[in-house]
Amino acid sequence: MPAAAPFAADLNAAQERGKYIYEEGRSRGRRVIMAKIQGGEPTPGHILPCINCHGADGRGAEDYVGVAPLNVNWYALASGGSHQHALRAHSPFDELSLARAIILGKDPDGNDMDKAMPRYDMAQEDVEDLIAYLKVLDSQSDPAISGSSIGLGTVVPTEGQHAHLGEAIRATIQAVFDEVNARGGIHGRVLNLFVGGWGANDNPQIWTARDLVNKDPVAAMVSPYIPNYDTELEALANEKRMPVVGPYTVLQPDGTDDEDNEFTFYLLAGLELQAEALVQAAAAKTDAADTRLAVVYPRVKFFDRLAAAATRAADKLGFASAFEQVFELNQFPAESTVVELRENEAGAVLFLGSTAELVQFARAADAAGYTPQLLAPGLLAEKNIFEVPESFDRKVLLAYASLPMDYSPEGAADFESLHEKYGFNYDFSIAQVNAYTAAKVLVAALERAGRELTRDKLLGALEELEEFHPGLVPAVSYGEDRRIGSVGVHIVPVDLSEGRFTEPVRWIVPNSAD
Amino acid sequence: MYRQIRDLLARSAALAAILCVASAPVSAGNAPADEAVAEAKARDYFSNVELIDQDGEPRSFYDDVLKDNVVVISFIFTNCQSACPLMTRNLTMIRDMLREDERKAIQFVSISIDPLRDTPSAMKEFAQKHEADTDGWLWLTGQPDDVNFITKRLGSYTDDPEMHTTTLLAANVRTAHWTKIEPNVPPNGIVARLRLLVEEDAAP
């Protein structure tokens, strides 16, 4: 662990030697340490150091290749409660019985311990050092959180065609942090931003995130932009027990089935929730029981998930039926799709292609005298949405997780002043709003987490955010089982005769009574 | 355990099939023209997909890794806490047991089977930890599709890293002699096998 240095000074000599044994499986005294696993041949201790299974924090893991390495923090070992095995309970450890456990594999009651726990042949002095370290393991501070600073990270493109977007995100986060730091930081700690940059080559962008958290002391991540690696980022966050606030993405799940995600806090409704909200809006406009819904989408990673969510929503809302129409990316067959949908009597069409493709579809449909309701996430819609023929007037509904109408006067003024002071450009306003909001949410959680900060406390503080107004988007709330801050969606009808968005804008919270 | 054994068996069978395909045309003759044809076929089979080494440098798999070499290939992932460190430890021992001229003649290759988590720097750190970040030892990762393609071609693909093969591949690529070495072969046995492969090259 390269980040070990900053707090090693807090350890006394014995504890430091113990830490070396724990992490490296070697003795500072150059005494041989051998490990024997499952009665096999002895192998050098550095092949099987404690940290491999019990982790840097000593908390172990729930399941690792069929065994569960236990919490070896002293409070857990020496108290009766927290150190329990599935099939075996035993009295608490003391120094003597713990030494016996490490060397002979016997628990305090003399039972054999699990075979997966190696038996270590090591000198008495080394065992003592190791136990000295285990006693302070739980009070070891996070290398990313010092007395005077907190290390926070983001990952953005810094080279290549998206570098400007990356710079907009970075500059916005830095501006929010600079303002906080100018006021003295949070509970006496300044916020340091570490940036991982991708774009110089075709390597998987998630590598940049991994390298950043392995190399730099980063306690949490803010507004990372790592397209197409949402799941891998969630996994990384869980693995490092590192909160990630506001990834810049639209592919977050709808929040109903994401038990795999513990540490990633999304800001707004993604495409999945937007698709569900659009279906809900369509149900309100037509007689659902008589309406067949078609979901038209390109064959792109994750889009099948969006279609499935929409189909589920249609099912729940009592649509007559729902079916999917998939096309190859960039090869949208407008005419044949119109024929197909018309034959199947689709009264509402959720369209997940580009606006250009939507316009093609609408023109072909118009020519055929077929004018179903058209539903589309606004993010995918560009200005040429107004090229949709007038026969679709007010039959086009767009979904947005957030709109300028969500700006609070204070939020707008604050963002405007950052704009002035730091010379932002507005070319990437969605990315900047995301970065600004993520930074505000993180700052709010850090303030609430208090001076005795740990990653787990930050996690708890994020979960406790309730109706927090970041300024430019709807209020966000999290909870123990909630990882999407704002789950509502604006539904905007399009006035095609006037060529503008129109009223009434509806606010739909999918899966709620509404 | 049964699943592990079954999977190992399945992979061994796949590997055997692949090795037949790879070596059959090559052993047909010795004329330079035949060799060129054989090499083209081998390149075609193993491909020149670019993997990334522990220093972040791209490596075309056939031309930069295999071509004209005696290779020992292992499959690892850096988060692995049992088999991979032990296997790597064995390989460093084997490497130390070789004479210097033999060591120079052999390209050690360790390929990640968890490429999204194994960044080049993670591979380097793993190699350094095992004193194996050295000339003549490539630690390869890359785009998942590319890495999976190569591990499939080598008969060692798995979608579950925990269940990955610990079988080593050893080959004299020039003579198209490929063998697999089970992990329970003692180090001096492996050294002997490698010597034979190196000597094959020296034979007239």
Image: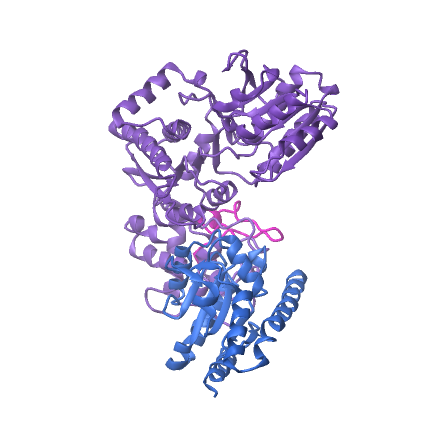
Q: Is residue B155 left or right of residue B106?
A: right
Colour chain B appears in: blue
Image location (x, y in percent) of residue B56: 38, 57
Q: Is residue A13 left or right of residue A69?
A: left
Image location (x, y in percent) of residue A225: 42, 38
Q: Is residue B148 magenta?
A: no
Q: Residue at x 50, y 32 (%)?
A: A250
Image location (x, y in percent) of residue B132: 40, 67
Q: Quadrant of the C terminus of chain A?
A: top right
- Residue farthest toward the bottom in the current orientation of the protein: B204
- Viewer can see residue A45: no
In terms of depth relative to the viewer, which is nearer, A491 or B79?
A: A491
Count of numbered circles on the image: 0
**Majority secondary structure of magenta residues:** loop
* Residue A328 location, quadrant: top right
Q: Which residues are magenta?
A: A70-97
- Viewer can see residue A212: yes
* Residue A370 location, quadrant: top right
In terms of depth relative to the viewer, which is nearer, A229 or A61?
A: A229
Q: Is residue A86 magenta?
A: yes
In terms of depth relative to the viewer, which is nearer, B123 or A76?
A: B123
Q: Residue at x 54, y 23 (%)?
A: A399
In terms of depth relative to the viewer, which is nearer, A361 or A509?
A: A361
Colour chain A appears in: purple
- Residue farthest toward the front in the current orientation of the protein: A367
